Amino acid sequence: MMKYFKADSFFYPYEEKKGGYLTVVDGKFGDWVADVPADAEVVDYSGYSIAPGLFDSHVHGYHGSDVMDNTPESIETISKGLLSAGVTSFLPTTLTASFEELDDVCKTIASVKNNVSGSKIRGIYFEGPFFTEKFKGAQNPSYMRDPKIEEFDQWYESSEGLLHKIAIAPERDGVEEFVSHVVSKGAIVSLGHSDATYEDALHAVQAGASVWVHAYNGMRALNHREPGMVGAVYGIPNTYAELICDGYHVSPEACRILLDQKGPDHVALITDCMRAGGMPDGDYILGEFPVIVENGTARLKDSGSLAGSILKLDDGVKNVVDWGLANRLEAVRMATFIPAVSCHLEDKCGQIKKGHDADFIILNQDMTLKATYLDGEKVFEN
């Protein structure tokens, strides 16, 4: 069955098509057309824009649930909840934990991958455990250690090949061999929670690492004599920086400097959202640590350090536009096509393209979310 979606504009990766209609055939994107037959079934969104469904490539939880709950019910809750943020694809993201706990999480997510009813699981992201204790963030340093290829291989097998991205600190022993092995399996290596030098980071990238974990946060700062991790983010080309645009993790001005250095084609907007996303202020748990959510942030109770975010990705897109950091097309691209490219998943999500699943969002002119569609069917509306 063919439907024609009418809107003021349509966001393709590098073009905002004005007017016309987007065809959806049996839950897949078809062509953009200027006119429709007289008897066409038209879904009229005049006054609005249509963009690809957002892709959150770094998200721990939502609506009271966390990936580390390690239950099918929690994964389903996160999947459905993310629709209210315009997210139609995501990487459920773990925290630093024991080998056995992470192995169990792999099995749980693999068992529900094709059965969630909301945002689609495109892979698993391991944020840790191969980090440095100095920049542990809101993660348990007792599990942090040097990377082991045999551990990754077991997780990969338990996940049925779903383990798609793993974050490590480049100064750990054995990193270059580990990175080469992971990349040979078709997975992505990101770098963060690290006190690495510029040279350490460069060697990891030369071995195949290609993404920076939440740029600026949890990494050695830039110094004019030792550029550090932040200098590596700025200076090493053909790499992708994750960026949390909630106004708390990174100031708008620092976001602008990063975009000036990397360009919008190498910045992927993420949330790093924890279980309190979409929930009231109050007391929560992140991993094993008590967290207080108030005044727009989630912070560890004992130290006051940021503990993930409560950011919705659609709000991150709007912030980038409102702060004057990017135009509408660039902002949408940084939350759709660029994260997909950074994860080698652009053939599955992140763009309006003929034959792809018709997962898309309806945006008001002020870039707020109007509705979310999966496979051509409306699944959320504000």
Image: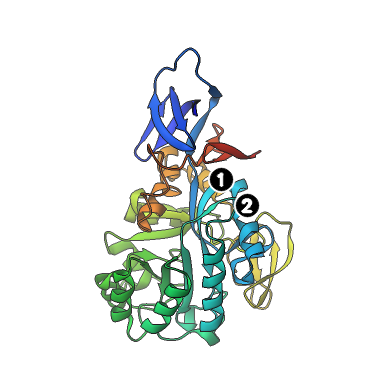
Type of amino acid under label 1: Gly
Above or below, 60 against 328 in this view is below
Q: Give the camera-side residue of 255 and 205.
A: 205
Which residue is painted at 24% across and 71% down in the image? Answer: 206
Q: Position of residue 92 (x, y in %)?
A: 53, 63
Distance of label 1 from label 2 (alpha carbons) = 11 Å
Residue at 31% of width from left, 69% of height from top?
Answer: 183
Q: Earlier in the sequence, mark 1 or mark 2?
A: 2
**Residue under numbered circle 2:** 80
- Colouring: rainbow
Q: Residues within 10 Å of mark 1 (few under 14, many from 20)?
A: many
Residue found at the far left of this picture: 206
User: How many marks do you count on the picture?
Assistant: 2
Q: Nearer the viewer, residue 216 or 341?
A: 341
Mark whose residue sits in front, 1 or 2: 2
State whether residue 14 is above or below residue 33.
below
Q: Position of residue 1 (x, y in %)?
A: 50, 29
The residue that label 1 is drawn on is 86
Residue 11 pos. (x, y %): 42, 35
Q: Residue at x 52, y 48 (%)?
A: 88
Callouts 1 and 2 close, C-beta under 8 Å? no
Type of the residue with mark 2:
Lys
Dot 2 alpha-carbon crowd within 10 angstroms: few under 14, some 14 to 19, many 20 or more: many
In-front residue for pair 83/333: 83
